[in-house]
């Protein structure tokens, strides 16, 4: 933090699944991949133990190796939302100061992102049943196809969403 900057609010995401529909869709979509990947893996291992020739053993090994990416993708889709819901409150920290918003992530890919609070900063509040999200940074970016997409950053799934939104609006009013 810079000199003269004081912390107004700090917090973490509320634990749990917040977008249940999206999580359930991903889990249902990944379940066939997981099931087929596991079935092919164990079938390939079974065929490997009963292979009469070297070429049959090679085919069984190929089938076993071919099943791994499918099972891995399925496991990621099925268990990923559950792991993320459980670890987000432990690995993500938010802080709002008199000049900026800080988002600190620890874990596998640690990072610290700072978003200045300016009068021109576009704000968005998405209230939820258990937690709200305050988006305070949106940027248009081009993807590999050249299409424009919006990247948002902010305090996701926090218990005091409205309070933080009003604090940021108050900061913007002072800066004008």
Image: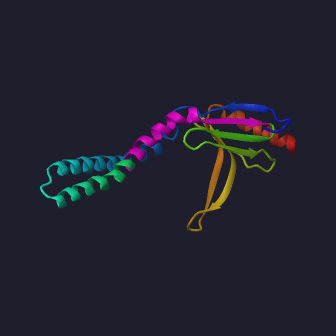
Left or right placement of residue 89 versus residue 172 in this view: left
Q: Position of residue 56 (x, y in %)?
A: 17, 58
Viewer-proximal residue, 57 or 166? Answer: 57
In which image quadrant can residue 151 be found?
Answer: bottom right
The residue at the point 65 percent across, 47 percent down is 153
In the rendered image, residue 93 lying in the magenta stretch gets the answer: yes
Image quadrant occupied by the N terminus: top right
The residue at the point 74 percent across, 36 percent down is 96
Look at the image and give the residue range highlighted in magenta: 73-97
In the rendered image, residue 133 lying in the magenta stretch gets the answer: no
> What secondary structure prevails in the magenta region?
helix
Residue lying at the far bottom in this picture: please name it: 146
In which image quadrant can residue 95 be found?
Answer: top right
Task: Evaluate whether residue 129 shows in this view.
Answer: no
Q: Position of residue 120 (x, y in %)?
A: 79, 51
Q: Position of residue 23 (x, y in %)?
A: 46, 43
Left or right placement of residue 133 versus residue 114 in this view: left
Q: Position of residue 97 (x, y in %)?
A: 77, 36
The residue at the point 14 percent across, 58 percent down is 53
The residue at the point 73 percent across, 31 percent down is 9
Viewer-proximal residue, 94 or 124? Answer: 94
């Amino acid at each position: 933090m810079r000199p003269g900057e004081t912390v107004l609010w700090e917090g973490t995401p509320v634990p749990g699944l917040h977008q249940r529909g999206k999580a359930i869709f991903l889990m249902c979509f990944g379940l066939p991949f997981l099931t087929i990947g596991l079935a092919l893996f164990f079938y390939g291992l079974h065929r490997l133990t009963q292979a009469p020739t070297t070429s049959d053993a090679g085919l069984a090994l190929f089938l076993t190796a071919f099943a791994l990416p499918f099972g891995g993708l399925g496991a990621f889709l099925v268990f990923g939302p559950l792991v993320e819901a459980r670890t987000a409150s432990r690995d993500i920290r938010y802080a709002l100061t008199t000049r900026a918003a800080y988002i600190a992530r620890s874990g596998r890919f640690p990072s610290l992102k700072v978003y200045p609070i300016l009068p021109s900063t576009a704000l968005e509040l998405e209230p939820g049943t258990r937690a709200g999200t305050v988006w305070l940074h949106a940027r248009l970016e081009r993807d590999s196809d050249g299409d424009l997409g919006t990247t948002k950053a902010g305090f996701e799934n926090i218990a005091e969403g409205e309070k933080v939104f009003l604090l940021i609006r108050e900061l913007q009013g002072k800066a004008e």
